Image (cartoon, rainbow, N blue to C red):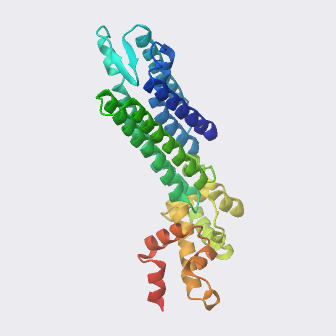
């Protein structure tokens, strides 16, 4: 599903580029279906962004799909009706309302702002939930994945603002249509490039972070059993050191301990008052503290020792160590000498 949504976004962006090209060259007039689809496309971008994050969270809401589909079809139908009835015409990329246009038609484009507002609020909230879910399931690369999705969302907001600005500038004769077409094409192309870089940085995948792992269902864990399992969890981690695996996930730990993932998540969150990400990286920090004073590792750099302890990247290691100890690894090494 994620891949199909991403493909749809790329196709939609390409169609948007084609629409602007036709519009800037005054080739859209009287083509009612193109006018309808082209003016509906701005809503498609933010909707796909919202659905993509939902797919990562395995947060399927059929009502939401119906709502978004109905919204897109309704906008398309409204623009088609207004164009075919002569209420609006396409002058380049600017919609011009006729003197006989119904009063309600003037609220169609401004209503986009409400769609952006409510969908944007939902996306920001979903990004926060997604990051929390990542911390409940994975022990590395949490910050990178969540940040890149945020960049995608804000890049769309910035791109939309720039495009609106360029279109208005042509309307007031501050830019030639050819120059504006180049700028708009550059903005949309840059956004595609940045999302492509996002894909490369994440091997063209984002980790799934299902909401199911943060729900404990009816686990039936009694307090005394929680204490026993928590002790067993600590013992297993200290003895087997699974945190040395840079890609350790909640599912990996679940298979090793033969416990359901949601039970381990419940133990970590309720009994230990932390999350999987912070718990595992806390052990890695302690392992680093032991190794940094061990003569056996004196030939390794601080980053080399960090990798031996299960950290996956330099930025992640420095951020986690500073948050845990209040100092950088270099400052810590000087302190213990």
Locate residue 209, reporting x and y percent.
57, 50
Q: Is 289 located above or below residue 69 in the figure?
A: below
25, 63: nearer the viewer: 25
Locate residue 153, reporting x and y percent.
45, 44
Locate residue 323, reporting x and y percent.
44, 70
**Residue 132 horizontal side relative to residue 263, left or right:** left
Is residue 37 among the parts visible in the rendering? yes
Q: Is 196 located above or below residue 308 in the figure?
A: above
Is residue 217 among the parts visible in the rendering? no
Residue 162's quadrant in the figure?
Answer: top left
191, 278: nearer the viewer: 191
Q: Is 289 located above or below residue 23 in the figure?
A: below
**Residue 235 horizontal side relative to residue 190, left or right:** right
**Residue 144 horizontal side relative to residue 295, left or right:** left
The quadrant of the rendering that contains the N terminus is: top right
108, 259: nearer the viewer: 108
Residue shown at 57%/45% (left/top)? 56
Residue shown at 61%/65% (left/top)? 229
Residue shown at 37%/14% (left/top)? 88
């Amino acid at each position: 599903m994620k891949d199909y949504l991403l493909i749809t976004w790329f196709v939609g962006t390409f169609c948007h580029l084609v629409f602007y090209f036709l519009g800037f060259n005054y080739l859209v007039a009287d083509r009612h279906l193109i006018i309808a689809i082209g003016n509906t496309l701005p809503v498609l971008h933010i909707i796909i962004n919202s659905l993509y994050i939902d797919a990562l969270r395995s947060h399927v809401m059929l009502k939401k799909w119906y709502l978004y589909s109905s919204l897109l079809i309704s906008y398309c139908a409204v623009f088609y009706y207004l164009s075919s009835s002569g209420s609006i015409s396409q002058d380049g990329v600017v919609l011009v309302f006729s003197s006989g246009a119904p009063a309600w038609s003037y609220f169609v484009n401004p209503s986009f702002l409400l769609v952006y507002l409510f969908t944007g609020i939902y996306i920001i909230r979903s990004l926060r939930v997604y990051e929390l879910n990542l911390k409940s399931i994975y022990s590395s690369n949490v910050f990178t994945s969540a940040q890149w999705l945020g960049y995608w969302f804000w890049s769309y907001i910035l791109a939309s603002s720039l495009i609106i600005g360029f279109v208005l500038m042509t309307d007031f004769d501050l830019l030639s249509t050819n120059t504006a077409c180049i700028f708009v094409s550059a903005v949309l192309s840059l956004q595609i490039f940045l999302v492509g870089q996002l894909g490369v940085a994440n091997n063209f995948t984002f980790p799934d972070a299902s909401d199911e792992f943060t729900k404990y269902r009816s686990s039936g864990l009694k307090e005394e059993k929680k204490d026993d399992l928590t002790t067993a969890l600590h013992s297993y981690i200290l003895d087997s050191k699974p945190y040395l695996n840079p890609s350790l996930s909640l599912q990996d730990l679940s298979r090793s301990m033969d416990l359901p993932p949601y039970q381990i998540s419940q133990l970590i969150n309720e009994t230990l008052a932390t999350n999987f990400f912070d718990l595992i990286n806390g052990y890695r920090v302690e392992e680093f503290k032991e190794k940094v004073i061990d003569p056996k590792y004196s030939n390794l750099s601080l980053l080399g020792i960090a990798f031996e302890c299960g950290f996956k990247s330099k930025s992640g290691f420095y951020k986690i160590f500073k948050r845990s100890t209040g100092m950088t690894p270099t400052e810590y090494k000087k302190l213990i000498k």
